[in-house]
Image (spheres, rainbow, N blue to C red):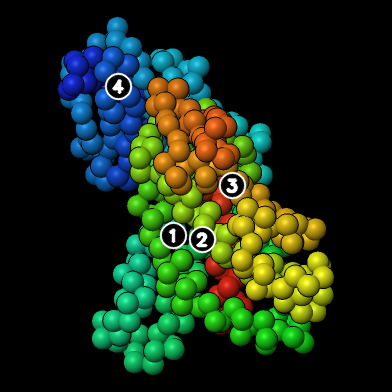
Amino acid sequence: MGIVSKCVRCLSCGEAYRLRYNIGNKYPQSSTFPCDKCGEDLTFGVDESERGYIKENLEIIEADMKLKVVNLHPELTINPEQINDPLYFPSVLSLVKHNAEGQEGIFGFQSAQLSCIQYQQHWDEVQKDFRYLKEKRWSLLKAEFGTDHAKVELEIICRVIFTIDFFLVGSWKKHFAGIGKELRQTLGHPNFTAFKDFVTGWKDDIFFNKMFQVMTTYRKIESILLPTLLDQKCGITPSGISSKIDWEQIKHFYGQIYEIYGDMLAIPSAMNNLVTRGNFKTFSTAGFTIEKYLETDKAGRTSNFMQNKNFQFLGQYYVASIRNGTHHEASTFDKNDQIITLRTGKGGKTLKTIPLVEYIVHCNELYARLLIVFRMCSTLIYS
């Protein structure tokens, strides 16, 4: 929770600032802000040793208390009204907020911090083996896992699911508790075998294409999505601005998970059919089948299960206008105000603006829901 105070100069135009960089919990860590004068992205941070500094497009200069203050935090949002306040302490204020508003107070905040570290560590440990499994490089897995391919697959998928559990803490873990009730009814249903065969038919695509792809992408950009994550895990709605700006790196991510999630929604829809009507293929609309469902526009694929209270949260943060406005290069980003302008509707004639922080929230929330559906699939297929 310490603060590194450094005076820096933009290498492009010479504009100088006094940075108050609030130390985060993960290393290496950095924050980025645009130079007021020339707009260049300036990055400052600390490495794993906490002795060196990460510097991009800036240099450290002699201390000058008269310079404009810029407050930065790699893991929390910043109050835009206090970004230049020399007495602003976002870490302290965040703890106060979590103690007052968080689902589990400061202990929930600490648990969320730990989960971020554990998720990263466990994914880094399992990612290579997961790739070997995806690419069927059995000889590279033999020494650790043996030669029984089915057992090798099960062991590695279990390790990936174990990794997912570190991400799904706090509010998302509570949501998954409701999913657990639906899973128990599904596994005990007399017609479960037919449903299991249906899901198992998608196994390679679910795990070796979709799950591997989206988890690998998230790991690459997670530091940009981190500033809202602790609040989200603790059930607090994030606000403010981000100190980690790299729109080019994340602008397509929501569209990517939207597309994958839209495909995966067939699983909770079919589960809901099985539990409520006894047949995973039978929808409430006469003559509507699972085959027809898979041909529908993805925007409406949550409607089938929204009456089921345990599935309702799966329909949240699934917003077609954000997907359309970012996926088709129909967005612009003002990095000074951190506002995204989306062109939606036919011909992109409708303009919609959202703050960067709101976009990041949607990315994290939909990613968490996608991980929950992946976890559901692992239980259904390997049970």
Q: Residues within 10 Å of mark 4 (few under 14, many from 20)?
A: some
Residue corresponding to mark 4: 39
Residue corresponding to mark 3: 320
Q: Where residue 211 sits: x, y (%)?
A: 46, 66
Residue corresponding to mark 2: 260
Distance of mark 1 from mark 3, alpha carbons? 19 Å
Distance of mark 4 from mark 2, alpha carbons? 35 Å
Residue contact between numbered discs 1 and 3, judged by CB atoms under 8 Å: no
Picture residue at 57% right of the left edge, 40% below the top: 346
Residue corresponding to mark 1: 214
Q: Indicate the quadrant where residue 297 lies.
A: bottom right
Q: Name the kind of residue labelled 2 in the image.
A: Ile
**Quadrant into which the C terminus falls:** bottom right
Of marks 3 and 2, which one's residue comes earlier in the chain?
2
Distance of mark 1 from mark 2, alpha carbons? 8 Å
Of marks 4 and 2, which one's residue comes earlier in the chain?
4
Look at the picture and state if 221 lies above or below 65: below
Q: Nearer the viewer, mark 4 or mark 3?
A: 3
